[in-house]
Amino acid sequence: PNQGPLSSWGGGGARSQHLDDAPDALASPPVMEIQLRPLPKKQGAVGSENRQANVRVDPSLGGNRDSLIQLSPVGRSSVGADSLVSPKMMHSPEPPVGGAPVFEAEAPRADPVRKRSSTGNPDLLSEDDEEEDVPAAGAALQEHFASLKAERGSGVEKGIKSIILDAKKEEMRSKRYDAKISGTGTALSVCVGTWNMGGRACPDDVDLSSWLQRDEFDVYAVGVQECEAGAGVSTANQRPRWERKLSDCIGTKYVILAKHCLGTTHLCCFVRKELQAECHDVHTAQVITGVGKVVANKAGVGVCFDFRHTSFLFVTAHFAAHMGKIKARNDDYARIDRELFRLMCPKIAATLPKQSSMSLMLGIGPDASKVAPAPAPTMDQTFPPAKAGGRVEPSVSAHFDRVFWFGDFNYRIENTREYVDGKLGEKSEQALQSLLEDDQLLAQMAGQAVFKGCKEPMIHFAPSYKYDKGTDTYDTGKKMRVQAWTDRILFRTPADNPDCIRCTNYDAVMDIRLSDHKPVVAHFEVHVPTEDKGTTKVGRQAMKKGSSACAIL
């Protein structure tokens, strides 16, 4: 436990560069010491009184550099997840004489709807440990969901139906789609896959070809969660075994263009070998959204690159679990979208208000009212997205030409298990649509809370969660969790070219039974113009390397 720093360049868990990339001037920055420790143990609390950590934080606020955080254990125990049990921290008004400012992390209190997890920390519950934070069943549960709908109002309910109708129209238009859109160019075939692996490694004898068809596409982007370990119990920064499995499945005609691993969240992009020379400005980045914004039990990972004159962005993410954690999921999305913008587009992000190191660590965003005006476009700065009024939008999704989000977003169906079982038993499109009207993600999108400007293909498959492992049977355990479309794939196109991406297939793969989630896949045709109509002249100046995991466990 006393073998030096546990983390390097990683303010707030959002990073995209190795320590070696830091300038010499910041090699030994001035630091202030902050002591983190649990408060005295309270009745019913979970945690240890004997664990604490010394944290050294760089107070420098210059430029876009992240903070240098060094963590070392105090006493006989190594730093554990319960050393930072809550992002809620209290700062003493004045530092003690001759000492450092003290931040005390409040010990978690007993939660009547969540049990102690296998990790010893209720904030690190795996989905197997999950206790739903809603009434158990019966009339109380039905009344709970009815009140949620009433709170949303008719506007959101109409918005959900509008999203479903638009997806149907998009699907019908896709069937009549001509790949030769206005102007000359190329139609790239893109396969996007997401899978929560349930904390397990993929055995050699498991065939993934029904999920990722061999030699079929120009680009493969594969994001997985809980890869080879449960959420929050790994600090791995690479998954060579999993990458070999993907390479064997996809075929020898491809190379890995970019990959990034943060704990159990992994993203890998493959391209055909003959296309590699046309891909440039390749970058990866990560954003931690887990406990205290420093534990990587939940996170987002991004890969961006330019193909000819068109910029691509792929983001895979694992959002907060539990039925009632809608706001937490929305916050996870907002944080990833904002922090990836800062990491992948620092030239434009530099126009935004600066944040302190501690605010980054706690995930506190800038005041939107103080967003700086967008700089005047020049020959090397031609980003299209500035909000009305000439203000830069602090969103990574708004600054690329072709954008894909995919992962275990954990949004649930707000209805009872009995109701969902009944609808799925009907095996009809009308029944699926009625369940989609209870889908939390569509409700949040209808209210403009998340994924602004994004679209999702029409869903024709049964919920991808939660199955008894090794079967096609939904949860038969004592908790009888409600099924949900937790695993999703969305895309975004420029406002002036909405038809540049079309989805040709969107499905869950039922014959892979390793996890309690089914893999989900989407196939796209993506138009790339020959003429220079993209955003690649911008010179994003993103960090050239991804970074290893920075997590406290």
Image (cartoon, helix red, strand yellow):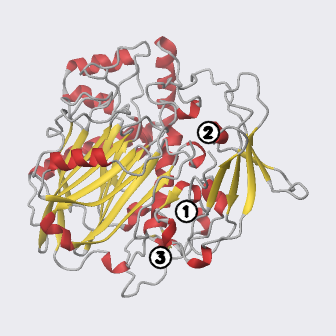
Secondary structure at badge 2 equals loop
How far apart are labels 1 and 3 at the CA level? Answer: 19 Å
Type of the residue with mark 2: Gly
- Of 232 and 540, nearer the camera is 232
Above or below, 374 against 406 in this view is: below
Spot occupied by residue 2 in the image (x, y as percentages of width and height): 64, 48
Farthest-out residue, front = 3
According to the picture, the residue beneath numbered tag 2 turns out to be 80
Above or below, 294 against 68 in this view is: above
Q: Say which quadrant the N terminus sits in.
A: top right
Above or below, 525 against 201 in this view is: below
How far apart are labels 2 and 1 at the CA level? Answer: 20 Å
Type of the residue with mark 3: Lys
Q: Are marks 1 and 3 in contact (CB under 8 Å)?
A: no
Farthest-out residue, bottom = 379
**Residue 347: numbered disc:** 3
Residue 270: name its quadrant: bottom left
In this picture, residue 164 sits left or right of residue 97: left
According to the picture, the residue beneath numbered tag 1 turns out to be 9
Q: Are marks 3 and 2 in contact (CB under 8 Å)?
A: no
Q: What's the residue at 59%, 31% (across, down)? A: 121
Spot occupied by residue 532 in the image (x, y as percentages of width and height): 23, 80
Q: Residues within 10 Å of mark 2 (few under 14, many from 20)?
A: some
Q: Residues within 10 Å of mark 3 (few under 14, many from 20)?
A: some
- Of 183 and 295, nearer the camera is 295
Q: What's the residue at 74%, 34% (across, down)? A: 50
Secondary structure at badge 1 equals loop
Secondary structure at badge 3 equals helix
How far apart are labels 3 and 2 at the CA level? Answer: 37 Å
